[in-house]
Image (cartoon, coloured by chain):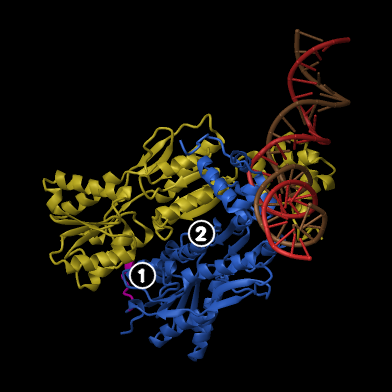
Chain colours: A blue, B yellow, C red, D brown
DNA sequence: CGCTACCGCTGGCACGTTTTAATAAACGCC
DNA sequence: GGCGTTTATTAAAACGTGCCAGCGGTAGCG
């Protein structure tokens, strides 16, 4: 009997009437409790509980001019890398009373644009995005609306914008360097679309490592570009490499999903890893360590990426004047396992 | 010059003025285009593009009484099972112009309740939820607000509610039956909290299979209950089992994350799978096939679960009178791989 | 020819909240 | 006790949209 389940929603006005105060006072109880006398406040809070009142977020947003939601646009929610990021985002947002609206672009510009439109309609307070390509125009459209944007896993090219990223060139160099150290002379780089910055940077890093070893990147590095970056694409890449004859000594995959698929493909073709061909992935997702041949990889501080990006974003939203834009760049870390064990 | 990036937002009123029509007509162009003469419509659409107008979702929600967002509450976004579900949800929602608000409960009642509150504040049109326990009271609070709820991976106990689930008792029976067929006599069931229905049902199924084989579930099935259902917990379970001495013949894990962690733990302890102990997981996540010893598992139509749940939800929202509530129950499927290969 | 139905559009009200200026009450001070 | 100052509360005005009654005009109908 205490919960007034009327079926319809109860507004701030009804709470006010029931408590014998004006709607404005109820609003104050909700938003600036210290401005309300203790006695009045507790009476109002009591009524709120009795009536089961829940603030109407839309009305609040409309009047206040901004919402308590943030948009999160990722490239592939099926990739544990992004799941980890999302977990970090969700944790921070939830702690601070923000809701997260999820958008999955699948690397598709059209889908990404549609998601951005939804975010704009919802008047999200801010946007976290791993852009699917380099085109900054789309983001300007968002920023022009006064929505803060923090780039995730992508360095900002402008000083008036926050970003959190991991150095992919270093990562690529580390990965390829590790393969070369293992004795490989001919490498393959299996990657998603090279329009994706991460892929391109990791390739550049690999080329640097090859050049530093005194080899010619043009001949010592075979690039296999796949349309997607999942396990299926990795398996197809394996078939392609095997069918092409002359295998490279070692393969560097642009992410672990590709690497795991590739590994499966190689094993099915009767090849031994790392004996016939060494293999290294990228991201060090949880499953890398548990795979058929445990997978060497490049570890990134994924969850932290999501947390820090969200903290930066909400700081920018809530303290616009004191906020200092930051472009944070983490360094990745080599995790060597069986798939690159020499011998 | 075509995009009026004024910095501030442009309202339906300004569009109307610019196009020489009334705000009501612009509203009609947006919501009921067929009611507007083609010529007028195209003129308005032109102005909308020129001014970069984007509908204010909150104002729309406030006036219309319902939003274009749905809430998605899952137990563990880090589990590929839920990621697959989320992908299905996102795809359908996106197609129909709905935004998805993500909530991750981590199996924590408090977090789940906080998320539900956020959903209520946002006045989500509907809610998709994999409840973290059996308590239906929390959902009644939501439903009393007139928000449709569809249960995901959880059968509804009442006829006035939609649900999409997979038969976990059958799944448990299939898994345990498969292990018994392989010659095992003493089984272990490694599970998350038995307050989770899925875990309980899978255990019941296993017990049924054991009883059907003429054995006594009480002595032939050792239950190892872990507080979490991730790989780390699985690894700890392996340590626990190994330390406890006398290993079972075969182990059934309540999900693949537990199984992969367990597998790693067993291998590290020097045990051979399936020679020393057979192992089967649940969910058949992508990584199950690529693991050190490829993992037998029980496959569920995960992505489909998300798609259908969302279709049901949005049908219930958009066609409330013609909508027929459905409790859909899929049957899981055994995928036998190396980890249960007999011999 | 009158009646109705429809067409394309208008104008204004309502949605639930926040916020500001104004009011009322309480208080300390000379 | 009048006066200025602080504190607690109120009333009213937005915020941007959706909805509906209703405008004059026209076509179809009996």
State whether residue A114 is above or below residue B147: below
* On-image quarter of the N terminus of chain B: bottom right
Tag 1 and tag 2, C-beta contact below 8 Å: no
Position of residue A240 in the picture relative to residue D6 (left or right): left
Q: Nearer the viewer, mark 1 or mark 2?
A: 2
Q: Confirm whether residue B24 shows in the render.
A: yes
Magenta stretch: includes residue A272: yes
Q: Secondary structure at mark 1?
A: helix
Give the residue at x 19% y 47%: B207
Q: Using a 10 Å C-alpha cutoff, classify the residue at mark 1 as few (fewer than 14 neighbours), some (14 to 19) or many (20 or more).
A: many
The location of residue A238, given as percent across then percent down, is: 41, 68
Q: Secondary structure at mark 2?
A: helix
Q: Dividing the picture into quarters, in which one does residue A245 lie?
A: bottom left
Give the residue at x 62% y 61%: A126
Magenta stretch: includes residue A202: no
Q: Nearer the viewer, residue A201 or D8?
A: D8
Q: Which residues are magenta?
A: A266-274
Q: Confirm whether residue B70 shows in the render.
A: no
Q: Using a 10 Å C-alpha cutoff, classify the residue at mark 2 as few (fewer than 14 neighbours), some (14 to 19) or many (20 or more).
A: some
Residue at the disc numbered 1: A266
Q: Residue furthest bottom?
A: A214
Q: Dividing the picture into quarters, in which one does residue B257 lie?
A: bottom left
The location of residue B2, given as percent across then percent down, is: 80, 58
* On-image quarter of the C terminus of chain B: bottom left
Q: Nearer the viewer, residue B300 or B229?
A: B229
By secondary structure, the bulk of the magenta-drawn segment is best described as: loop
Residue at the disc numbered 2: A94
Of callouts 1 and 2, the N-terminal one: 2
């Amino acid at each position: 009997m205490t919960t007034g389940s009327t079926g319809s929603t109860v507004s701030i006005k009804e709470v006010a009437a029931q408590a014998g105060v004006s709607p404005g006072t109820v609003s104050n109880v909700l938003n600036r409790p210290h401005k309300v006398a203790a006695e009045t406040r507790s009476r109002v809070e009591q009524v709120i509980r009795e009536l089961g009142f829940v603030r109407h977020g839309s009305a609040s947003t409309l009047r206040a001019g901004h919402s308590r939601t943030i948009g999160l646009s990722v490239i592939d929610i099926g990739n544990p890398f992004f799941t980890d990021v999302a977990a970090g985002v969700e944790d921070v947002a939830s702690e601070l009373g923000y809701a997260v609206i999820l958008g999955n672009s699948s690397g598709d510009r059209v889908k990404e644009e549609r998601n951005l439109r939804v975010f704009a309609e919802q008047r999200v307070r801010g946007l976290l995005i791993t852009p699917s390509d380099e085109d900054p125009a789309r983001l300007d459209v968002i920023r022009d609306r006064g929505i803060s944007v923090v780039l995730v896993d992508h360095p900002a090219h402008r000083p008036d914008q926050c970003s959190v990223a991991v150095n992919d060139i270093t990562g690529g160099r580390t990965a390829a360097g590790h393969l070369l150290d293992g004795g490989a002379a001919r490498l393959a780089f299996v990657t998603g679309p090279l329009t994706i910055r991460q892929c391109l940077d990791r390739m550049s890093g690999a080329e640097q490592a090859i050049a530093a070893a005194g080899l010619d990147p043009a001949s010592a590095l075979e690039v296999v570009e796949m349309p997607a970056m999942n396990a299926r694409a990795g398996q197809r890449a394996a078939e392609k490499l095997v069918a092409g004859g002359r295998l490279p000594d070692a393969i560097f995959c642009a992410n672990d999903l590709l690497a795991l698929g590739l590994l499966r493909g190689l094993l099915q073709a009767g090849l031994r890893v790392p004996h016939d061909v060494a293999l290294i992935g990228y991201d060090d997702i949880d499953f890398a360590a548990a795979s058929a041949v445990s997978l060497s990889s490049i570890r990134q501080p994924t969850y932290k990426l999501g947390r820090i990006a969200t903290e930066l974003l909400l700081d920018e939203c809530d303290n616009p004047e004191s906020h200092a834009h930051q472009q944070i760049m983490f360094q990745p870390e080599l995790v060597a396992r069986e798939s690159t064990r020499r011998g």
